Amino acid sequence: MKTIAGLALTLLIALASSVTTRAADAPLKLVAAENFYGDIAHQIGGGQVDVVSVMSNPDHDPHLFETSPSVVRQLAAAQIVIYNGADYDPWMDKLLKATPRPGRTVIVAADLVHKRAGDNPHLWYDPPTMPAVARALAGALGKADPAHAGDFQARLATFLASLKPVNDKIAAIRKKYGGAAVTASEPVFGYMAAALGLKMRNEKFQLSIMNDTEPSARDVAAFERDLKQHKVRVMFYNKQASDKIVLHLVDIARAAKVPVVGVTETIPPGMTFQQWMASELAGTEKALAGPSS
């Protein structure tokens, strides 16, 4: 009996140890509201993190996003959550309150860069934002999984170093084209335009489109005049939105041979954050150089 009891005890201990080991080795569950934050989580977390990005469809307008039961379930299980804040994704705060989880870490990009509701919420285009998010994420991952803290810090260093070509391109464009007047359908690219030293026009129009309100006739006329009279060097527009007024202005810009640059609010499929930024900067640089003859 003692032998059988001892064997049973040994088996129970071994089973408990196996379960504990599997739990410890299981990837941390992380939910990112937007896929650019999810991409950073992949790059820093590696195989130690299971990442779900809620908003990732390039064909959807992020402003029209609606939550689903699957998103609720994913958040309920998440140990780490990243979202933008500044009222860009207000649904996230509501869902987090509805799915409380002890010990869950929540990273809000807006809080890290001291932005709030009323500020331009397209924070990922502001060069300081992603390094701040990456550092906060590496710290949160290290606390949740101390055994791999060194790996997270090493990947953080790699990520920060990988931003150098992007920052170098920003500096080069600013040096060559700083002060050039540009316009945009909405302030998606606003922070990056400012980093490039570009002078943005028609900002009242942009706020109307972003807030889903009708631009005034005066603001529309001013935008059209800027394009037809070549008072702006480039027009940026959000490729993920399909407002009729915006598409009308894109047509006017093209007819007037004002270069048009389409930007997006989510990373296109098959790209990393760095590749996405590099691509949009390349398009911007080409447009600023002038229309091809």
Image (spheres, rainbow, N blue to C red):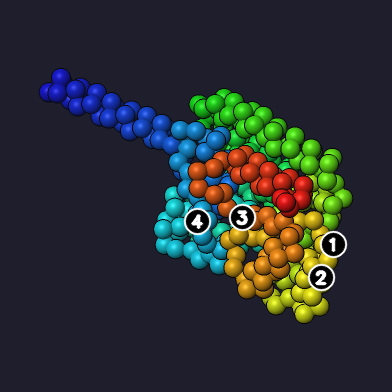
* Label 1 – label 4 distance at C-alpha: 35 Å
Which amino acid, by three-letter code, is at mark 4? Asn
* Label 3 – label 2 distance at C-alpha: 25 Å
Check residue 264 in the rendering and tell me which mark sits there, or answer none. Answer: 3
Q: Quadrant of residue 4?
A: top left
The residue under the point 77% across, 78% down is 216
- Residue farthest to the front, as pictured: 293
Which amino acid, by three-letter code, is at mark 1? Lys
Q: Residues within 10 Å of mark 3 (few under 14, many from 20)?
A: some
Residue 168 placement (x, y as % from top left): 75, 34
User: Mark 3 near mark 2, Cβ–Cβ under 8 Å?
Assistant: no
Check residue 176 in the rendering and tell me which mark sits there, or answer none. Answer: none
The residue under the point 73% across, 76% down is 215
Q: Which residue is mark 4?
A: 57
Which amino acid, by three-letter code, is at mark 2? Arg
User: Mark 3 near mark 1, Cβ–Cβ under 8 Å?
Assistant: no
* Label 4 – label 3 distance at C-alpha: 11 Å
Residue 26 placement (x, y as % from top left): 40, 35
Badge nearest the viewer, 1 or 4: 1
Label 3 or label 2, whichever comes before in sequence order = 2
Q: Quadrant of residue 258?
A: bottom right
* Label 2 – label 4 distance at C-alpha: 34 Å
Label 1 or label 4, whichever comes before in sequence order = 4
Q: Residues within 10 Å of mark 1 (few under 14, many from 20)?
A: some
Residue 172 placement (x, y as % from top left): 79, 37
* Left or right, residue 73 beside residue 199: left
Q: Which residue is mark 1?
A: 231
The residue under the point 51% across, 53% down is 56
Q: Which residue is mark 2?
A: 225
Residue 36 seen in this snapshot: yes
Q: Nearer the viewer, residue 248 or 119?
A: 248
